[in-house]
Image (cartoon, coloured by chain):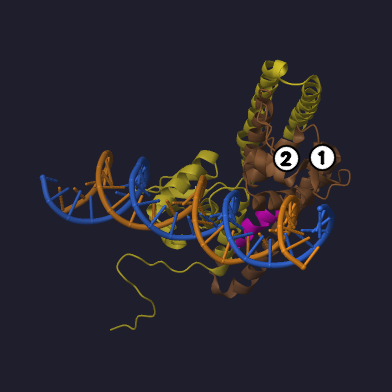
Chain colours: A brown, B yellow, C orange, D blue
Amino acid sequence: MAIATQDVSEKAKPKPLPRVRLELVDIFGRMAQGLSFPRSVGEIYGLLYLASAPMSAPEIGEALSISKGSVSTGTRQLLALGFLRKVWLQKERKDYFEAVLELGDMVRTAYDQIFKMRAQNADRRLTDVSETLADEKGELSPEEYALIKERLARLTKLQKRAKQFMPLLERLIK
Amino acid sequence: MAIATQDVSEKAKPKPLPRVRLELVDIFGRMAQGLSFPRSVGEIYGLLYLASAPMSAPEIGEALSISKGSVSTGTRQLLALGFLRKVWLQKERKDYFEAVLELGDMVRTAYDQIFKMRAQNADRRLTDVSETLADEKGELSPEEYALIKERLARLTKLQKRAKQFMPLLERLIK
DNA sequence: CAGTTTGTTCAATTTGAATTGAACAAGCCG
DNA sequence: CGGCTTGTTCAATTCAAATTGAACAAACTG
């Protein structure tokens, strides 16, 4: 009877992650939080970023001790953002995931999706306010009307500048 | 006996805000959330942005129906970020606040405080990970070591680019 | 087909941040 | 001084987002 140097149980060989990987998981987890994504989303990416082979959802859940549900929603988000790729490994039926390493591209995507959309939104809402002001003109004292008008104009100007700025920024990023 | 057309109670004449102002309060509130600040902080700024005169803390609380505590912490944060100014109005003993309208300047401040600080942080942490990798070299298979090393190098490169990028961005902003 | 594994969805729970409100400190006024 | 107003701090509460876990669906396996 051979001396078992390691637990060689039938299926699970969870083999703890090396510290480097744990640290990167943590870093990306925090980074995600900072960008107001769920921490777990960042952790998944951090885990896969240093993986030497694609990992399956159950493996990911195991390694990070998070639930099936979280892995499922987390990977979905990351796929949608283009941070992860699905990989069909041999004739396995499981899904496998790998990190997209080209983070530069991702920055661009994020910029387009988040920043640009927000700018548009802000634009629309600011227009709405100006309309409201026009509607209310009668109910406001002339002084108040003038003051508000001036300040809204300020905001609009600022926004115009921001808009001019964006293509420049885009060129730099790309 | 004159007919009271309005409630002329002894002290509080809360006079509801015009719709324009409410809308801007809402916009700035949401914007704050988007930038992961407390909504109330954005609302306070939005309120003051269209105020025709400085407002006291109790007035702010009243207008937004938020508590003394929130007003106190909110104004503190906004003052710290430079979005608000304290104004000593005549010989009043209350503090009065007014919005700093130069939002362009504020963008600069925010950039310095938030973005720059984050970049530094990421930097430090990435260095730490590389050190950990060096420590662990012995415990990793040569292949894994090589792979991790390569990927960390990628991140470091990305970060260098980001760093080079920053002064450019700064020049554009200023 | 029954049994197993994988993955999704959603209601319940947990967790963490924002907000409240009460206790306290400080300044002013009669 | 005693009462009144203002402002801060902090513990308790509330609220929203993230996470879990259970129920379900789908795909494969013997």
Side (left or right) of A68 relative to D10? right
The residue identified by callout 1 is: A100
Look at the image and say whether residue B21 sits in the magenta stretch: no
The residue identified by callout 2 is: A45
Q: Nearer the viewer, residue B59 or C3?
A: C3
Q: Position of residue A143 (x, y in %)?
A: 55, 64
User: Is residue B109 placed above or below A6 in the rendered structure?
Assistant: below
Q: Position of residue D3 (x, y in %)?
A: 17, 55
Q: Which quarter shows the N terminus of chain B?
A: bottom left
Determine the residue positioned at 31% across, 82% down: B2
Q: Which quarter shows the C terminus of chain B?
A: top right
Q: Provide the secondary structure element on which disc 2 rests.
A: helix
From where the camera sits, is residue B104 visible? no
> Considering only order in the chain, which callout, 2 or 1, is on the residue closer to the N terminus?
2
Which amino acid, mark 2? Tyr
From where the camera sits, is residue B115 visible? yes
Label 2 resides on the chain identified as A
Res A7 → quadrant: top right
Q: Position of residue B34 (x, y in %)?
A: 63, 51
Which residue is most to the right? A90
Look at the image and say whether residue A156 sits in the magenta stretch: yes
What are the residue bounds of the magenta stretch? A146-157
The numbered mark at residue B155 is none
Q: Tell me if mark 2 has few (under 14), some (14-19) or many (20+) residues whose alpha carbon lies within 10 angstroms of its own.
A: many
Q: Position of residue D17 (x, y in %)?
A: 59, 53
User: Is residue A112 placed above or below A152 in the rendered structure?
Assistant: above
